[in-house]
Image (tube, helix red, strand yellow):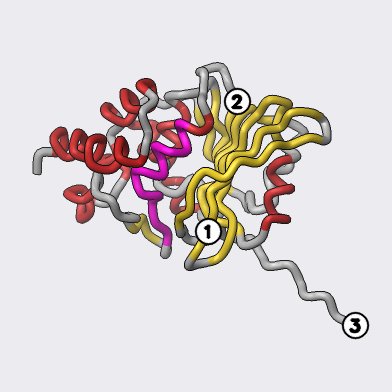
Amino acid sequence: MNLEQARLNMIEQQIRPWDVLDRNVLDLLERAPRDAFVAPAWRGLAYADIAIPIGEDQTMLPPKIEGKLLQALHLAGNERALEIGTGSGFLTWLLAASVSHVTSIEIRPNLAENARRTLAEFEVDNASVEIGDGSRGWPSSERFDAIVVGGSVPFAGAVVEFERQLAIGGRLFIIVGNAPVMEALLVQRSGEQQWLRESLFETVVPPLSGIAEPRPFAI
């Protein structure tokens, strides 16, 4: 399997057709070692347009969604980012290559440890992988310039938990809804109590672990 050719095919057949045209994002994806973050049995499909299993009933986001979210966040390199759901650690690698520091939260200890190990192999020293439930954000007073939520949330109210952790001017990527239709949103904080929401595209991804539907109102 020619992984270099597979990576280029991914760019031309998946990423560009989804209107990901930012040169910085394309350059990053052209050199990103996605195959190193999947199990050996899946390496031949590392650059395919599928959600690759990574263990514990979890999957990686398809490449086109990774490209789309990176373009939407419009990262300049000096941001502090929060990632909810480390998974394989590949999106953590992409973020670490795009910002000054990434704090990534993973609820599953085995996935967190695997991600740490792979990131260390690539000498990524500006990402910290923490074990915990990030479904309501991260219990820290820190505000972040960029937040990425790696799984979907079922209702719009859940977005508020993450919006509050944005610095002013910061941007949040999150997917909201239930199958068969979910909406990817970009949220930008424009003031202490002001947020702007932009619909990016429709998709379907697995739900974020730990998130719960609101309880129905009972009389």
Question: Crowdedness of circle 2 by 10 Å Cα count: few (<14), some, many (20+)?
Answer: many
Dot 1 or dot 3: first in sequence order is: 1
Amino acid of disc 2 = Arg
Residue 59: within the magenta?
yes
Name the quarter where the N terminus is drawn: top left
- As rendered, which of 144 and 56 lies closer to the eye? 144
Amino acid of disc 3 = Ile
- Extreme residue toward the bottom, this view: 219
Looking at the picture, how far across and down is residue 95, in whole percent?
Answer: 47, 31
Residue 212: within the magenta?
no
Q: Which residue is mark 1?
A: 182
Local SS, label 2? strand
Q: Which residue is mark 2?
A: 80
Amino acid of disc 1 = Met
Q: Name the residue at 35% across, 21% down.
A: 23
The span shown in magenta is 58-71
